[in-house]
Structures are given as structure tokens and as C-alpha cells.
Image (spheres, rainbow, N blue to C red):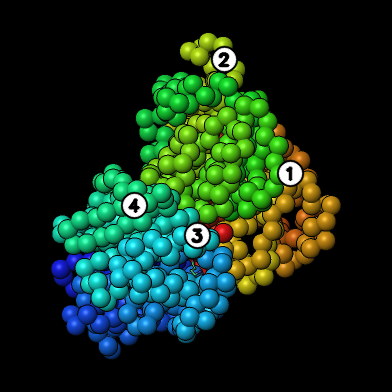
Amino acid sequence: MCGIVGALAERNVTAILLEGLKRLEYRGYDSAGLAVVNKDQQLQRRRAQGKVAEVEKRLEAEPMKGHLGVAHTRWATHGVPSEANAHPHLSSDELALVHNGIIENYLELKSRLTKAGYRFTSDTDTEVVAHLVHQLYQEKQDLTVAVEAAIQQLEGAYALAVIHQDQPQKLVCARKGSPLVIGVGMGEYFCASDPLALLQVTDRFIYLEEGDLATLTLDQHAILDRQGQAVEREICQWQHGNQAAEKGSYKHFMLKEIHEQPAVLAATLEGRLSDRRVLPQALGAKAMELLPRVKQVQIVACGTSYHAGMVARYWIEKLAGIPCQVEVASEYRYREVVVAENALFVTLSQSGETADTLAALRFAKEAGYLASLTICNVPGSSLVRESDMSLMTQAGPEIGVASTKAFTTQLTALLLLTLALRRAAQASNQDADDPLEAELVEALRALPRLAEETLQLDAEIEKLSEDFAEKHHALFLGRGSHFPIALEGALKLKEISYIHAEAYPAGELKHGPLALVDKEMPVIAVAPRDDLVDKLKSNLQEVRARGGELFVFADPVTLLEPEEGMQVLHLPEVHEVLAPILYTLPLQLLSYHVAVLKGTDVDQPRNLAKSVTVE
Ligand code: HGA
């Protein structure tokens, strides 16, 4: 999603803002821009449709310097991607504002401001905020007070950063519903929608909370909470290093992130397993008290995280014997739901800022759940702060828009949660030995090694991908807990190669999708050894009988061997319960190689954005 960067320093901040925008490029965007107050106290702005490199070219042609500035990468919600709609938006050439989010009452504000004489030069909802703050500034003559008064009138979601040329020592920012952090430097301050944008200048951050408004000057910051009370917020040290945000020798972040999976799966397990069980402390002290009371689980998530939730449903019902429901957040949040007694509300999100998931959590907190738990990759994010419990995945920053390592680490964390729920639900003596848990703990320990072995299939999968590059459609099949993996495989292919792909539980084939099968329709099957593999084999024969080309990812012991019209790739043998994690890897690689062959923008696919902070 769109990204904000702001800077106030004694040095020139143009290069810092530009570098910040480059570091936010991974989030997906369609235009970019920046504005600074120069030494003559004049606002200057450069914007462009397309990539940050376009803005950089404009800056080379017409350089600008200043010690105060704001910058933005835009992912359009109101108004087409164009230079005129790109942020920063100016008001009367005196004030510049960048915004992430959606202002729902913008039409009403626009008509009022138009009557007051403001002229609009864009179709965005954002421009109304620039003029509104400007109008209030005329009255109040103080940028903080003007922004504070303006946000009272806004409905919707925003992260904002605002500067005024008459207050060249002040950067004002605010958030409600969209993320914003303050970067604390030595005698300088920054703000951004993601700490990654600022790692070049600082490793100390303040995560603003819902409704906060911050005023940054060269040597201090002042924060008002949603009630307008002055508050102190903790300064947190960045723990992940800077390297994670660089591609290294890989051609794309996505490929790097696929190959990081053995390490991040190990990191997600680290310190959470004892010899034969999941450590009771792994989910925190609150969980030890709450999990034994859980009688039902409701999982809510979006996109790839939703698929992780779907896998967990199979695990939680099978291994913990607890009923579990899974729903996409954008539906759940607007539905009238019936909440069972002692139900646990679980959210999944890489960024912890996914707008729909966050809204669902806030709704759930009023709806009578026993407690909330989030599985998330970003410490300090809104979901982590607002949930009763959190289980952090240790994937490190994920830059590729199409999620890879965040998904498999979510699955790993979900299996830890399942085992904790199993113990809480089944053992009257919480210290009793559970042979199945011990077996799964051993299998989990082997997972990073098996992931490493699976990734060695890369060259074979690259070869396989040649059969897909010219195709327009693909069908993914799986059964049981591998149906969500088929869904995830189809989503990955759609996201980065733009090939239309669908996934079906293989048993549903004959109820409709079989009509689509012909030699132009590659069919990908996820076929590890499990209770349903023999049924799946029959489904594959149904495809073969209609001339469909099969590509099967199978266990060495399922006795699925290549034959005419069927290519088979064997993965290492893995415990049946953990197979969904391992079988995700070849599907990620397949999509990646198809996308590379098609020449698409792998890390920033068209129309998509990372960290979906708008509804
Ligand atoms: N609504 C604004 C900002 C969009 C946004 O936050 N995208 O992530 C616009 O359309 O410019």
C-alpha cells in the first residue's frame, strides 16, 4: 500500500526522502512524489506517475534542497494513477500533505471547501485534507492545532504527514486506521508508514497508537493521544538488522524469501519446543491460563493468511478436537455473527496492519469472545498491540508483495497453537506425555532440513514452468488440508504471472470444473501421502481421461510415477500433518519461474500492494 516518509533535520533531507521512497517500493504503488521547504522558506514539489525512478529523474533535472519535507508512494483509491493525483497535495502553495487511507466524508468536505474558495486540482479524497488543514491554519496560526482540529472532522482512515512553509521547524503527523512510526535521530526526526523506510537514518522508533497526533521539531517530539492528552510513547530499538531489506545476490526479493524459508521456519520454532512437547511458555503466560477454557476457535484473515487459517482448521479440529471456523475479514467484519461461549478469536496477518483484519478484531472485542490472539510478523504492529495474546512468526521483513515465507511461518505458528490447544483441551494433567505431540515435535524439528531439500528441486521446477508460460488458465487440485495449499498455489500464480488460476478440492472436479479440462489447461495436483491420496489418484485419472496435462507434486511413497501426460515431482518424505507446509514451496517456485518467463514485475505485481492498510 502507499507509503509515507517525512523528515526534519539540519541537513538536506531530499536524498533521505528519496531513499525512504525506494525502501517503500516493495509495498506496491502507482505514482510517487515529494515536497520540501527550501532555504527561502518556499515549498517545492516533484511528482510523477509510475516508479520512484521517474521522480528521481525529475529531481536530477530540477534539483531541490531543504531540511523539512514529506514524500509518498501512492496506491490509488480515489482518482486514477496520474501525476495530478500523486501526493504530496499542496494547499495555496504553502502547505504540503501526504496521506495513506481513505477519507469517507471527502465529498461533503470538498463541497464546503469549494464554497470557501479552495480550488481542487486532483480527484483524490486526500486533497480535501490539505485544504481543510490550510483553512484551519489561517485561523489558528499553528500547524499542530490546525491538524488537530482538522482530524476531528475526518471520517475514515488516515496516516498523515503535514508541513507548512511558514513553520519550517515543524513536521506534524497523525494516525487513525493506517500505520505510522516516528524515527528518532540525533537532533533530527523522521516519520514513515514502515520502519524499513528509515533504517538508513535511524534504528530507534516510536510506534504511534490509534488516534495519536505527533509534532516533531529538531530536538523533541510531543504526542497527543486520541483524547488530546499529552502522552509518552516508548522508543523501541529495531531488532532485525538492515540486511533483511536487501536482495543480496538474488534476482528478486521473492526468490530470496522463498530460499530463506529453512532459516525462518527454524527461527519460528526456536525456543518454543522442548524434547517432546511445545513449551507451555511458548504462547505466553496469559495463554496458559486462557487456552484450557477455549471451546471454539474463530480464525479471521485475508488473502494468503486466510489460506493459512484454512489449513489450521483441519489441524485444530483433528488434533485438538475443538470446533474451528475460518472467514475472510472483509466479510466477517460486516456480518451479524453468533459468538459461541468461550470462543477464541484468532487473527493472522504478516504486517499486523491489514485494515480489514484489524477492523474485525475491533469488532470481535465487543462481541463477547473469550480472548483474542494474533499470529503476526511485525512486533509493535496494531494487531499485536490490540490483541490479548500474540504469537510472533520470525520471518523477518517480507518485501515481495506475494507472500511466501510469511505464509509458511504462519502455518508453523498455527501448528504450535494447535498443539497448545490440544494439550489444554485433552490432558487433565498438563504435564502428561502425549506420544502424538512428541511425534509432531520431532517432525517440526526436521522441517527446516526438509524445506532445504525441497528447495533443491528448483532447477526441475524451473524446467516445468516452461509448460505454463504460454497458458492462460491453470487448475490446482488438493484434498483435505492440501486444498488450501492448492488455493494458495493458484493465488500465487495469479498474483505474479497474471495467469488465471483456480483451485478446487479434487473431489469437486466432477461437479463442474472438469468441463474446463482440455490440453490447454494444465492441472497441478498436491499429492502427499495421506488418507485421501488414493481418492486423489482417481481424480487425476478423471483429468487424464479428458486429455488434461497433469503436474503432480507427490510423496516418494505414493506410487505416483510419471507417465504420458503426467509429470511427477517427488518431495522428501514428511509427516502427513506437516505436509501442507512443505508442499507450499514447490508451488511458490513454480509461480516464480512462470512469472520470470513471462517477464512480469515479480516483486511488485501490477495493481497489488503489500500491507493492505485500506479497506
Ligand atoms: N486515498 C488516497 C490514498 C490512497 C492510499 O492510502 N493507498 O494505499 C488516494 O487515493 O490518493
Q: Which amino acid does label 4 sit on?
A: Leu
Which residue has dot 3 on it?
A: 157
Q: Which amino acid does label 1 sit on?
A: Leu
Residue at mark 3 to residue at mark 1: CA–CA distance: 46 Å
State yes or no: Cβ of the residue under disc 2 lies below 8 Å from any atom of ligand 1. no
Which residue has dot 2 on it?
A: 427
Q: Is residue 126 left or right of residue 359?
A: left
Label located before the other in sequence (4 or 3): 3
Q: What residue type is labelled 3?
A: Ala
Q: Residue at x 30, y 73 (%)?
A: 164
Crowding at dot 3, Cα within 10 Å, few <14 / some 14-19 / many 20+, comes out as: many
Q: Is residue 286 left or right of residue 295?
A: left
Q: Position of residue 339 (x, y in %)?
A: 67, 34
Residue at mark 2 to residue at mark 1: CA–CA distance: 35 Å
Q: Looking at the rendering, in which quadrant would you find the C terminus?
A: bottom right
Label located before the other in sequence (2 or 3): 3
Nearer the camera: disc 2 or disc 3 = 3
Crowding at dot 4, Cα within 10 Å, few <14 / some 14-19 / many 20+, comes out as: many
Nearer the camera: disc 2 or disc 4 = 4
Q: In this view, does 80 lie to the left or right of 503?
A: left
Q: What residue type is labelled 2?
A: Ala
Which residue has dot 4 on it?
A: 224
Residue at mark 4 to residue at mark 3: CA–CA distance: 18 Å
Residue at mark 4 to residue at mark 1: CA–CA distance: 59 Å
